[in-house]
Image (tube, helix red, strand yellow):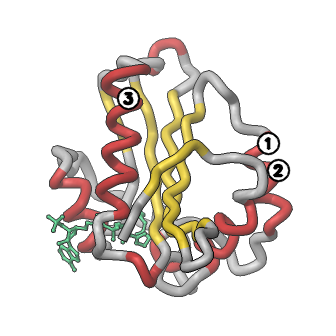
Amino acid sequence: MEIVIRPVRPGDGKGINELRRMPGVFENILGIPSEREARNEAGIAALDHATQHNFTAVTYNEQGEEIMIGYGSLTIESNPRRRHCGGIGMMVHRDYQGRGVGTKLMEALIGMADNWLMLVRLELDVFADNARAIALYKKFGFVEEGLKRAEAIRNG
Ligand SMILES: CC(C)(COP(=O)(O)OP(=O)(O)OC[C@H]1O[C@@H](n2cnc3c(N)ncnc32)[C@H](O)[C@@H]1OP(=O)(O)O)[C@@H](O)C(=O)NCCC(=O)NCCS
């Protein structure tokens, strides 16, 4: 399977919305069932060029058209004393999980952080039972720093 990682662009809001609401992804991110495509599209338009570095993972159907299969974000902290830190997040289409898409997204995000933004620290939050995500993050050297309690609502 060809996996291409490219910068997010106008029009990606539809694919992002589908990814964020699909079972297999939704449970492990912080979206809500009523999340609208317009919000996702507006979010792309509002991205700050200097501090927000988001990538879309795509593959192609038989007609050569793009299929959005993943999305990753890297946001540099705005506080001057935390400017060396970045927060990351990612999601992969349920039908394409476990096939290296998250790995490619992570390579793109870490490549930005290490080679272009010169960040010192990357941070992320993950649900404690999200074994696949934790395995991916550990593969890239992330270490657990703490366990939050009642951090986010999850299906009641
Ligand atoms: C987490 C997520 C981004 C990972 O992306 P992915 O494309 O599935 O990940 P990859 O295929 O690149 O790598 C997954 C790794 O975990 C391993 N893995 C898969 N399932 C696992 C499991 N149940 N337990 C432990 N390791 C597991 C794979 O073997 C692979 O490691 P390897 O490359 O050393 O073989 C993706 O599964 C996803 O979007 N999940 C739902 C949303 C989500 O959890 N987002 C992250 C929120 S913090």
Give the amino acid at mark 1: Ala
SS for callout 1: helix
* Mark 2 beta carbon near ligand 1 (under 8 Å): no
Residue furthest to the front in view is 63
Per the image, the residue denoted by label 3 is 113
Q: Which mark is residue 45?
A: 1
Marks 3 and 2 sit apart, C-alpha to C-alpha, by 25 Å
Place of residue 32 in the rendered image (x, y in percent of width and height, measured from the top left):
68, 74
SS for callout 2: helix
Place of residue 79 in the rendered image (x, y in percent of width and height, measured from the top left):
55, 19
Q: Quadrant of ligand 1?
A: bottom left
Give the amino acid at mark 2: Ala
Q: Marks 3 and 2: CB-CB under 8 Å?
A: no
Residue furthest to the top in view is 80
Q: Which residue does the image show at 29% across and 75% down from the upper left?
A: 98
Image quarter (top left, top right, bottom left or bottom right) of the N terminus? bottom left
* Mark 3 beta carbon near ligand 1 (under 8 Å): no
Q: Marks 2 and 1: CB-CB under 8 Å?
A: yes
Q: Nearer the viewer, residue 146 or 113?
A: 113
Q: Which residue does the image show at 80% across and 70% down from the upper left?
A: 36
Seen in the image, is 1 located left or right of residue 72? left
Q: Which residue does the image show at 59% across and 69% down from the upper left?
A: 64
Place of residue 131 in the rendered image (x, y in percent of width and height, measured from the top left):
24, 73
Q: Nearer the viewer, residue 19 or 67?
A: 67
Marks 2 and 1 sit apart, C-alpha to C-alpha, by 5 Å
Give the amino acid at mark 3: Ala
Label 1 vs 3, first from the N-terminus? 1
Crowdedness near tag 1: few (<14), some (14–19) or many (≥20) residues, C-alpha within 10 Å: few
Per the image, the residue denoted by label 2 is 42
Label 3 vs 2, first from the N-terminus? 2
Crowdedness near tag 2: few (<14), some (14–19) or many (≥20) residues, C-alpha within 10 Å: few
